[in-house]
Image (cartoon, grey):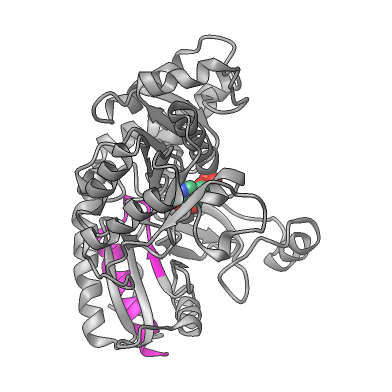
Amino acid sequence: ETTSAGVPRMPAFDHVPLPYDGPSAADIARKRAEYLSPSLFHFYSKPLNIVEGKRQYLYDEHGRRYLDAFAGIATVCCGHCHPDVVDAITRQAKRLQHSTVLYLNHVIADFAEALASKLPGDLKVVFFTNSGTEANELAILMARLYTGSHDIISLRNSYHGNAAGTMGATAQKNWKFNVIQSGVHHAVNPDPYRGAFGSDAEKYVRDVQEIIEFGTTGQVAGFISEAIQGVGGIVEVSPGYLPLAYDKVRKAGGLCIADEVQAGFARVGSHFWGFETHGVVPDIVTMAKGIGNGIPLGAVVTTPEVAQVLTRRCYFNTFGGNPLCTAGGLAVLEVLEKERLQENAFVVGSYLKDRLRGLQEKHEIIGDVRGTGFMLGIELVTDRQLKTPAKDEICHAMEYMKDMGVLVGKGGFYGNVFRITPPLCFTKEDADFFVEVMDIALSKL
Ligand code: PLP
């Protein structure tokens, strides 16, 4: 169905945005240019002024509604301002805003217990942080302390954060600064689309073995990997790779760290965690983004044995596990369950992927459609054979889509991959609308 202007009609949504009488987009942009870090970026030629969010929709200062297919970088999993999450935080804010390491507080312990119940095996000891970066920093520290080794292996094209240790583990020049990031080796990425060995897991894993043999003492601290690289452009690690890599790393004395900051918390649909889609059980799992639905919250979960390493010294985090955030986290888990959002991610995500595959048949510029559940990627190329990244085209397409009311992310080494990571309450009608809009946008290129 299209409007009189020939634009697909956005699905009906029962919400009246609040009146907005704040400053204009231009005023905010001026302030941002003067007072906010110039490192911040935005996708559109004219930055959007988003003043309200409701479930899978965002609203600008004029009350215009946008379908949010990026969810604040795969973060808002239950949907914007979910009433249960908002209530939980508000109730907690009225009772006690802050208390972390010094005193007992049942909210923090309850959320830790709830998180542990979501993880397999002996993964049950939780350390709370405020972000994914902090969680991965701690995971790397734990692996080093536990093993007595320093060497970490991560995958090329990965993103694990932007502090000293995690910037080392991150393996893309776009996200690196020239500072000391010692002891990290970057293994060849088992990328089925661009990788030299296609989906041949055994060939890729030889590189892990060679790193261990030629780049270390033969003993390593650990291996860190996403199940699906998010910032790297929704690259699914080749099937069969992680079990083989875990085996090599464990034989070299290392711990296996699953970075679930983006893929975790029901986003992949078929499972609650990304690593489960590969049939592995990590020694340490890190998470953030979705676990707080947008509230700053991250966590590291490991075994009681590994967790012991932190008792050797004082180790704490002032805000990590703040009751405000953990109350929100508990509500997120309840909403995921109550609204069966993981199932929705699976069903609607699979439907959307099929429809996007249909678009690939029509549009030569779509080189690849990939991902699982609500972690989908579309790689644009100007030549399918040469896989030439369509860098400018994706920017134009995003602009057209925004004008038709759809917001989507992009990423990947060349910045030519659409990242579709909506709130998990995204509906089939939203998926249809998204596809229609993308179809028109790609036709205009
Ligand atoms: N790990 C992954 C897989 C991520 O995608 C990100 C951020 O995008 C991080 C870690 C870092 O998380 P944060 O930005 O919360 O520090």
Taking the magenta stretch, the answer to whether it contains residue 116 is no
Q: Residue at x 37, y 62 (%)?
A: 188
Q: Is residue 302 visible?
A: yes
Percent position of residue 362, x then y:
24, 87
Q: Can the viewer see residue 15?
A: no
Left or right: 60, with 337 as reference point: right
Q: In the rendered structure, does residue 432 fall within the stretch colored magenta? A: yes
Residue 42 rendering spot, x and y as whole percentages: 60, 66
Left or right, residue 410 beside residue 45: left
Q: Nearer the viewer, residue 403 or 227?
A: 227
Residue range corresponding to the magenta coloring: 418-445
Viewer-side residue, 7 vs 245 = 245
Name the image quarter holding the N terminus: bottom left
Q: Position of residue 228 (x, y in %)?
A: 33, 55
For the point 21% across and 52% down, which residue is it? Answer: 346
The residue drawn where x is 46% and y is 80% is 400
Front in this rendered view, residue 216 or 346: 216
Residue placed farthest to the top in the image?
104
